[in-house]
Amino acid sequence: MVVDRGIINYLDRANLSIAAPEMMKELGLTATDIGLLGTVFSWSYALMQLPSGWLIDRFGTKKVYTIALIWWSGATMLTGAVHKMSTFIMSRVLLGVGEAPCFPTMAKITSYWFPKKERGLATGIWDSSSKWGPAIAPPLLVFLMVTFGWRALFYITGAIGIVFAIGFFIFYKNPDKSRKLSEMELEYIQSEGAGSEHSIQTSKIKWGELFKYRSVWGMILGFFCTIWIWNIFLVFLPLFLTNVHHVSLKELGIYAGIPWLGGIFGNIFGGYLTKKLVDKEITTPIKAKRALISISAISAAIVVCAVPFVTGLAMTLTLLTLALCFISAMTGSAWALAGDIAPPSMVASVGAIQNFGGYFGGAFSPVVAGIIVDTTGSYSLAFISGGLIAGCAALCYWFIVKNPIQE
């Protein structure tokens, strides 16, 4: 069920990139304007990470997530009704506020349902929802846009979110309240202190004291490097294919979704790989995730920097698919790492703080990329600089993130 919510989350983000070409034609927007809309979303999303993690840890996943999902679905529908840049900005700010609790909630739910050695794969599966959304979005949203117009994208995806919010509130249960688990399954889940919100003791560490820990700062800086390139892909991938490779609107529905399939594979295989390393007692859960993130960051840097130097559409799509595969392996392991680094009662808070660092700093990348494109008429510098920044994530996660928070 959390995978479904993640897909809805990213459908509501990806609709801007799909609608962008038509919005630019109808409303006279520039690439910088589209980048700015991506940036203001990221800033509001990042700032709200800090209180959302605390709210989730304080009031529980079910209440906070349901309210958030209804909020961001309403903001999505509002986007389809506006006509001015100022009101577009307001709607994207509201979207960022509403979407902020989504992934910290998923990290918290994972800590309830899975022992530590299982969380890498579980996180890889639910984090793949952030790639299923953009993968599904192009063919679905292009069809809706061609049939009903670009504004319909926002109305329909917003309405879908409200329906799923109601379903989540009705059907989601923590393990200790689930009737589908056997007693043996519940005992296995509870073997490392998981199982329910009540089984997790309150930490002696205050929320503000989390910023005193070296590993937390490594996660903040490392996720900034990761989300910088992630936001460029999320906002500009369809425009890049349209402007540079002259992909038509109907073809865009197919080609813009292909690279995200690599992201899905990277998420799930990365989680599976870290689980196997731990199962075979080759290394610890923390070291397995740090190593995977570091290797993937270096690989992503090489592939992304190579994108401007190829000309054919097939080779470009291959590199973009590989890049998203490595980037997604990084994001999945980073979210799983929050459950290893944080005390059990503060998983959502640490995950949200990491996400804050990623999106507050990474918020600059869409507008910077938009300025580069408008100024130079090329995407080359945006990809090369983004690739180099992504590579720096290896330094942060390998050399700074080392030890769990000790109470």
Image (tube, rainbow, N blue to C red):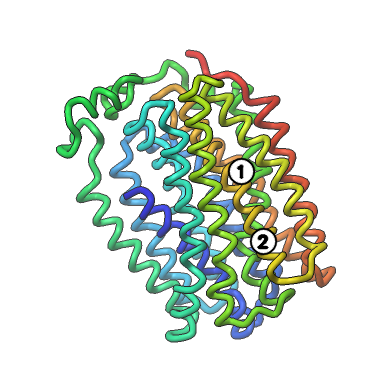
- In what element is the residue under mark 2? helix
Q: Position of residue 384 (x, y in %)?
A: 79, 54
Q: Which mark is residue 159?
A: none
Q: Position of residue 45 (x, y in %)?
A: 53, 50
Counting residues from the start of the chain, the first of labels 2 and 1 encountered is 2
Task: Say which amino acid is labelled 2.
Answer: Thr
| Element type where label 1 sits in the image | helix
- Nearer the observer: mark 2 or 1; the answer is 2
Q: Residue at x 43, y 33 (%)?
A: 119
Q: Position of residue 338 (x, y in %)?
A: 50, 31
Quarter-of-image position of residue 390:
top right
Above or below, 294 relative to 150: above
Q: Which mark is residue 318?
A: 2
Q: Residue at x 47, y 34 (%)?
A: 120
Towards the viewer: 259 or 27: 259
Q: Which quadrant holds residue 115?
A: top left
Give the residue drawn at x 61%, y 63%.
Answer: 235
Q: CA separation, marks 2 and 1?
A: 26 Å
Q: Quadrant of residue 26?
A: bottom right
The kind of residue tagged 1 is Gly
Position of residue 374 measured from the top left corner of the image (x, y, whole percent):
78, 71
Q: Do the numbered discs 2 and 1 sit on residues whose CB atoms are within 8 Å?
A: no
Residue position marked by numbered label 1 in the rendering: 358
Q: Is residue 344 above or below residue 366?
A: above
Query: Farthest residue toward the left?
Result: 179
